[in-house]
Image (spheres, rainbow, N blue to C red):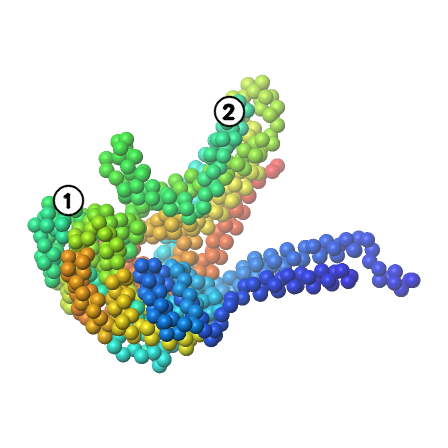
Amino acid sequence: MKKLISLLLALVMVLSLGSAAFAAPGDQADGKLTIWCWDKTFNIAAMEKAKEMYQAEHPDVEIDIEEVLSEDIESRVIASNGDTTTLPDIVLVQDHSIQKFVTNYPEVYHDITDEFDFSDFMPAKLGLSVVDGRNYGIPFDAGTVVAAWRTDYLEEAGYTVDDLTDIDMDRFLEIARDVKEKTGMPMLSGQAGAVDTVLIMLQSCGGSMFNEDGTANIAGNEKLKAVIETYNTMVAEGIFIEVNSWDEYIGTLSNGSVVGTFTGCWILSTIMSLTDQAGKWAVTNMPAMVGVDGATNYSNNGGSSWAIINNKDIDLALDFMQMYRNVDFYNEILPTTSAIACYGPAKEGSNYTAASEFFNGDAVFAKIVEFGDKVPAEVTGPYYYDARGNVGTAVTNALNGGDLDSELQTAQDTTEFTMGF
Amino acid sequence: MTQTSGRKLSMHQKQNIIGWFFLIPATVLIFWLSFYPMIRALMISFQGGRPTALTWSDPLTRNYKFLLKDRVFIQSLKNTFTYLIIQVPIMLVLAMIFATLLNDHQLKFKGLFRTCIFLPCATALVAYSLIFRTMFAYDGMVNAVLVKIGILNEPVNWLNNPSTAKAVIIIALIWRWTGYNMIFYLSSMQSIDYSVYEAARIDGAGAATQLFKITIPLLKPIILVTAIMSTNGTLQLFDESVNLTKGGPANATITMSHYIYNTMFQNNPNFGYAAAMSFVILILVAVLSAIQMKVGDKRE
């Protein structure tokens, strides 16, 4: 019997040792920051710079920047289901995910409304991370849309980048058809079913998949319909090539199998890494929609913000994040990351007005900042990705011969169905 | 003396206690890691609301009722059954053919062939899905080869067309799992005494007669097992749908498990609804397995 008891005791000890190993270290104020973000040439590089500048003044603070993919950060937050012990102090969140995550996990994200100075940040950007009037995100980069074109291909067809500046879709399609005829090149490429381009065009005319009150605005949305019709015309005529994955999309740019692209300005860090194509690219604004109210040549795609996690070293995290109100910091990270600040005063930095060698001496960053001021504000919500997926299905089905009105009605119904839970 | 002997356990009781003692760790672990989550999931499937503040649904079966109206779920159900109905029979027949060929006593390099056919099973699901995606890309190897040898006039965008995308998934599944099932058939074929076949041959039975009158009847239990395992596996199909086609185009290849994943991690997280869908899969697997056992197990 004694043996039995001692064996049982041993078993209990082994089990408790095992569970002790599961507990994560580092709660509360431990003078150490852990940060999760995902892009080595972009947000990680920016955070490394912030770390370097912060540690110059605070040498004892330990800052650990970990590379975790955006999808993985999201899965980990959901899998930890409200418990913050396994999460870091600061995470980077896609702008369109913030509303969803804060609404579902208010206990995870720290309300920083009264603890961080949000003056001088772009209001349209800040709006994306506000839930019920409270701030949950510190803006990182603007996703201002730029159109980047290969000047050598345009020249071959007898055009310059000026011909593609401040134009509308009718003129764009005209040029695109001509370029296709003369060079055999499609103008654009993108991922099938991902609807990036559709949503960029939608926002350029101030449209959204949601109404101000948060209800879905898909069926009978004239702007959305016009945008999808334009998009499908481009695909049908071979002006826009649909590929199956992100890598293939990047491939079309690096192989030079398309004339260009219009998307968030973060694409410039990829384009500028193609050193063999230096001097062959030019940046301008995107074509405006035709026949819809409020059409502009400006839009936004992507972009992300930093969120601070509860039950961690919040004071330290907030102090560190003051770096994102530092003009020098933004100026330092610009040339290497091409991350455009959402912080107004940063525009004064010398690198913002400097000419870019890659783009033949054009001051592209000043240009993007100028575009950013003209981007129409966007209505988003926690069901953004649900709606996006359903619109993607509608676009694909319409391309394959479905009736666009009824497809959009289906997308509306499916989105409302999910929202009805 | 009499007092202590009254408390003493008999030999049988002692062995019983020791037996139970050895079973405790495994039992505890199974209850903790397997049964408890299942019961929790069942409870969650009757709940709704924010993930960290779940409340009981009103009415309790609300999540299950929503399922019947969910277009994407019905689409995923149809897709999954398309895979099941087309892929499982082809795969099992192929596995049987390979096993029969490999069971031939005169065959040389048997080990080499066996390894080659079984090898796909050793590849990681994600890795092989990505390789298939690269092979079937618009500018991928398959198009290049088919155009070069003149079967196709122009490249096909395999993964961007509903029917070809489904076909690619089925081809991938067959490549991945045929060898796995073949090993089951082969091992039980090897346990059939060779003299049975010799006797049959003396009686004038050809290869086909031997296969249908001897091999298949004797393999019936193992065929049943592989059929149930494949059905189960196909109903839970996930990696191929996520990595090969991302469920597209327009949800044409999305599987039930993939949709459950989307409900949890892609869209606005809805734990209750995702749990309800998982239980529908459980019920489907149970029903299909019961039917197969009823049909397959005709012992007189």
Residue B28 % position (x, y) = 63, 59
Residue at the (46%, 63%) spot, across then down? A79
Residue B73 pos. (x, y %): 39, 56
Tag 1's secondary structure?
loop
* Image spot of residue A294 (x, y percent): 15, 68
Q: Is residue B164 visible?
A: no
Name the kind of residue labelled 1 in the image: Gly
The image quarter containing residue B174 is: top left
Using residue A123 as the reference point, say whether residue B294 is left or right of it. right
- From what the image shows, is residue A188 above or below residue B192? below
User: Residue at left 21%, top 47%?
Assistant: A257
Question: Which residue does the numbered mark 1 point to in the structure image?
Answer: A184
Closer to the camera in the image, A369 or A329: A329
Name the residue nearer the viewer: A101 or A304.
Answer: A304
Tell me the crowding category of disc 1: few under 14, some 14 to 19, or many 20 or more residues within 10 angstroms, Cα based: some
Q: Quadrant of the N terminus of chain B?
A: bottom right
* The quadrant where residue B173 appears: top left
Q: Which mark is residue A278?
A: none
Does A102 appear above or below B280?
below
Q: Residue at x 43, y 69 (%)?
A: A62
* Residue B35 visible in rendering: yes
Query: For this rendering, which residue is in front, A414 or B98?
Result: B98
What amino acid is found at the position of numbered circle 2 in the picture? Answer: Lys
Task: Report the residue at 57% width, 38% height from top.
Answer: B221
Q: Are marks 1 and 2 on the same chain?
A: no
Quadrant for residue B296, please give it: top right
Q: Is residue B183 left or right of residue A124?
A: right
Q: Report in which chain the residue with disc 2 lies.
A: B
Q: Label 2 belongs to which residue?
A: B108
Chain of the residue under the numbered disc 1 shown in the image = A
Q: Give the percent coordinates (x, y) of residue B101.
A: 49, 28
Q: CA distance from mark 1 to mark 2?
A: 55 Å
